[in-house]
């Protein structure tokens, strides 16, 4: 039989760790633990200081307790139900809405004339300044008239000479006719003298035409304005030789009283535009580009800058490249405010929607199924509601269905909303307002930029406030 190891030893081996342990080094002789009395003295000093502070400030303990309670309450609220998201709202109202189509127009001169010389000759003088307003018939240029005056006198002399010869020839032809009747002069001589008189009569007529032409050329030496308008810059200065029908001409005159405003609108609007033009009510309101920039800088509407003009022309064909048709309006331009070639903003009213429900444009959202708005009900819950938009501009949306007058729609904070979620109505970041005080919410007027304290609206107060505004 082999040697049987005692059970006590086997049990001890079973619980031994397989990992080898390092031998504990023996402490050197004479080593001592560090003293603990400095730490105890420091703790005692801190305790005495804290006790003295609390004795001198008896409210400090209460503040510490209140702070701890507030932290616990905040943690409990965070673990509870989510807080109602803040939104800004506006109240739907009914009013007349003008359906206006806007586009860019160009100012056109009512007439543009390039003044050209009709004769050749040196330019003697100019009777106007560059950029001057001139009237029809005003003197513009003078060309040297001397050679044309001489041509007129020469033509007059030719007429007088041929008239004298004509008188002699007519007398000879008359005598020849009488003598031929008596048989003294042959018929051939008679016919020759009569033909000579007729030829001289034709020469006199030609001389008179030449005289008229010479007088016209003499008149062309003085150039006058053919229209009322504004002159451009000089093309030829005095002293230069001018030639008949020079390509550049002498001056360009532009008639800017009145002016035309040309603009294009989509062909789908053509039936409404034609109906309003037949009624004599097709008016275009024009705003200058500089006025638009000034209005944008002040962020205010400036109706004084709108210039009403009556549309008096609709094109006879649709541009097949753009699908638009040209319209033109006439403006007297009394203060010369509009200049040809200038770009202007044109607004044309197609029709007016009578007593239509309107909401701010910010309230209308676009979803997969079309347009919708969030309506805040009497329980202060936001409900999405599909709407039919009839017309909208930069600030207002006219609705055909979906919202009734007096209902409250969300205009800010829609991204946080889900169907049926409770909301908190605010008029500025950090401030709540009661439902009866929902005036000018779409503009946030009267709200403090520091986030002043305000009251939350109860469902009952919210409903009563919306009902009063709707009535």
Image: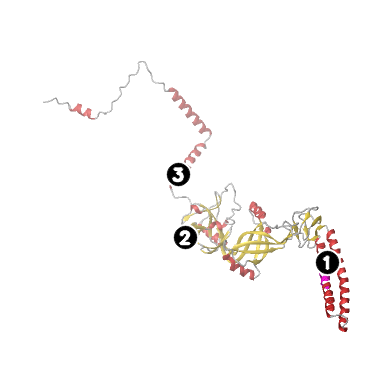
Tell me the CA gap for discs 1 and 2: 86 Å
Number of labels in the image equals: 3
Residue 373 percent coordinates (x, y): 51, 59
Q: Secondary structure at mark 1?
A: helix
Residue 298 percent coordinates (x, y): 65, 52
Report the span colored magenta.
201-207
What residue is disc 1 on?
211
Is 58 placed left or right of 184 in the picture?
left
What residue is disc 2 on?
369
Residue 233 percent coordinates (x, y): 75, 54
What residue is disc 3 on?
75
- Residue 468 appears anywhere in the view: no
Marked residue nearer the N-terminal end (3 or 1)? 3
User: Of helix, strand and loop, which mostly describes the magenta segment?
Assistant: helix
- For the residue pair 191 and 77, the one nearer the viewer reads as 191
Q: Residues within 10 Å of mark 2 (few under 14, many from 20)?
A: few
Q: Residues within 10 Å of mark 1 (few under 14, many from 20)?
A: many
- Residue 329 appears anywhere in the view: yes
Residue 334 percent coordinates (x, y): 74, 60
């Amino acid at each position: 039989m082999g040697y049987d190891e005692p059970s006590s030893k086997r049990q001890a081996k079973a619980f031994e760790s397989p990992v080898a342990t390092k031998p504990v080094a023996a402490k050197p002789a004479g080593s001592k633990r560090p003293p603990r009395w400095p730490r105890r003295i420091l703790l005692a000093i801190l305790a005495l200081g804290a006790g003295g502070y609390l004795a001198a400030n008896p409210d400090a303990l209460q503040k510490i307790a209140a702070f701890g309670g507030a932290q616990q309450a905040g943690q409990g609220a965070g673990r509870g139900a989510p807080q109602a998201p803040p939104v800004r709202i506006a109240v739907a109202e009914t009013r007349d809405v003008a359906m206006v189509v806007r586009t860019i127009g160009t100012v056109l001169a009512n007439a543009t004339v390039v003044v050209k010389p009709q004769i050749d000759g040196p330019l003697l003088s100019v009777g106007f300044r560059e950029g001057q307003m001139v009237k029809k018939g005003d003197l513009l240029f003078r060309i040297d008239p001397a050679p044309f005056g001489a041509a007129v006198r020469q033509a007059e002399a030719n007429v007088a000479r041929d008239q004298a010869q004509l008188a002699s020839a007519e007398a000879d032809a008359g005598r020849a006719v009488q003598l031929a009747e008596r048989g003294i002069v042959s018929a051939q001589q008679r016919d020759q003298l009569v033909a000579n008189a007729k030829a001289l009569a034709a020469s006199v007529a030609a001389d008179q035409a030449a005289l008229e032409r010479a007088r016209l050329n003499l008149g062309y030496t003085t150039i006058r304005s053919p229209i009322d308008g504004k002159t451009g810059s000089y093309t030829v200065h005095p002293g230069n030789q001018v030639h008949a029908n020079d390509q550049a001409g002498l001056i360009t005159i532009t008639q800017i009283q009145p002016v035309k405003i040309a603009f294009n609108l989509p062909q789908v609007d053509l039936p409404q535009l034609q109906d309003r033009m037949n009624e004599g009510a097709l008016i275009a309101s024009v705003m200058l580009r500089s006025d638009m920039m000034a209005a944008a800088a002040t962020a205010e509407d400036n109706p004084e800058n709108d210039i009403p003009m009556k549309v008096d022309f609709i094109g006879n064909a649709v541009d097949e490249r753009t699908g638009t048709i040209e319209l033109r309006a006439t403006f007297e331009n009394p203060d010369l405010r509009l200049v040809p070639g200038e770009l202007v903003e044109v607004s044309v009213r197609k029709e007016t929607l009578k007593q239509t429900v309107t909401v701010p444009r910010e309230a209308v959202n676009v979803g997969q199924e079309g347009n919708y708005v969030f309506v805040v009900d009497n329980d202060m819950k936001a409900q999405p509601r599909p709407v039919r938009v009839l017309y909208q501009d930069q600030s207002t949306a006219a609705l055909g269905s979906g919202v009734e007058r007096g209902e409250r729609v969300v205009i800010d904070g829609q991204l946080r909303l889900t169907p049926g979620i409770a909301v908190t109505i605010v008029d500025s970041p950090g401030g709540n307002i009661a439902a009866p005080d929902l005036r000018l919410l779409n503009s946030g007027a009267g709200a403090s930029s520091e986030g002043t304290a305000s009251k939350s609206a109860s469902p009952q107060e919210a409903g009563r406030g919306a009902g009063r505004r709707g009535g």
